[in-house]
Image: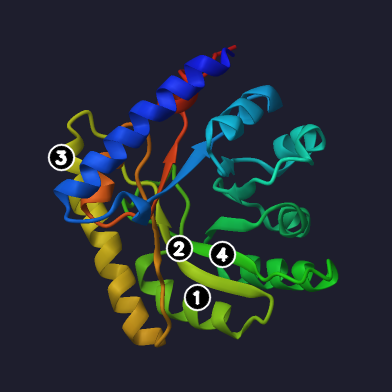
Amino acid sequence: MNADYIRENLLQIRERIAAAARRAGRREEEVTLIGVSKTRPATDIRSAFDAGIVHFGENRVQEWEGKRGELVNLAGRWHLIGHLQSNKAARAARMFHSVDSVDDVSLAERLDRARAEANSSEKLRVLIEVHIGGEESKSGSPILALPALGTRILELPNLNLAGLMCIPPFFEDIQQVRPFFQKLRELRDGLQKELDWELPVLSMGMSHDFEVAIEEGATEVRVGTALFGARETN
């Protein structure tokens, strides 16, 4: 892919982030852009990094294993944003800076053990993925299970619980997704009080709706198509 194409797209995304932040009375610097690099070759990731993106989101452990060898000299921050199967937790804990899709206690415990075995000097940042829309096709922690899951993660010495993530239902009218973003923010605020633990991260919003997410308090947005273009289908 043409590096100029990615660079131009990034400029437009940055402008949209800044405008959304202004509308919400926030600063652009409060929002971290995660480039969703799933299905993208290492060359595209390198071009995006050269254009100024530091954070990248991958969906699958195996796919990232196949690409990371070409990117070992990049000082990027690598996020696992897709659903993580427990049997791949050990590999994920070694390869990612953050797992943004923790949804149950057993997965958190596996990540903690694996991070300890890796002898990493840095705790593994984790977000709890919340099953915000009730869709059977999507994963995430049930809302009622959040306090127990959050409490357990805080007991695990090799994990750093930083906040919440969600993937709401898709609507053509982006205003229809606003209540789901509002709900995640409210859940975060309530969980902070219940756990007595700061949860600064709200990861919500993708290419289609990230501006609404920023207006509702997103601190991280996950953007793929708007940055790299539409994915090719086989």
Is mark 2 in CB contact (under 8 Å) with mark 1? yes
Q: Which of the marked residues, 3 or 4, is nearer the chain's N terminus?
A: 4
Label 3, residues with CA under 10 Å away: few <14, some 14-19, many ≥20:
few
Disc 2 element: loop
Is mark 3 in CB contact (under 8 Å) with mark 1? no
Cα separation, mark 3 vs mark 4, equals 29 Å
Disc 4 element: strand
Cα separation, mark 2 vs mark 1, equals 8 Å
Q: Which of the marked residues, 1 or 4, is nearer the chain's N terminus?
A: 4
Disc 1 element: helix
Q: How is the image coloured?
A: rainbow
Label 2, residues with CA under 10 Å away: few <14, some 14-19, many ≥20:
some
Residue at image mark 4: 126
Query: Could you say which quadrant of the image residue 123 lies in?
Result: bottom right
Residue 85 image offset from top left, x and y in percent = 66, 52
Q: Amino acid at mark 2?
A: Ser
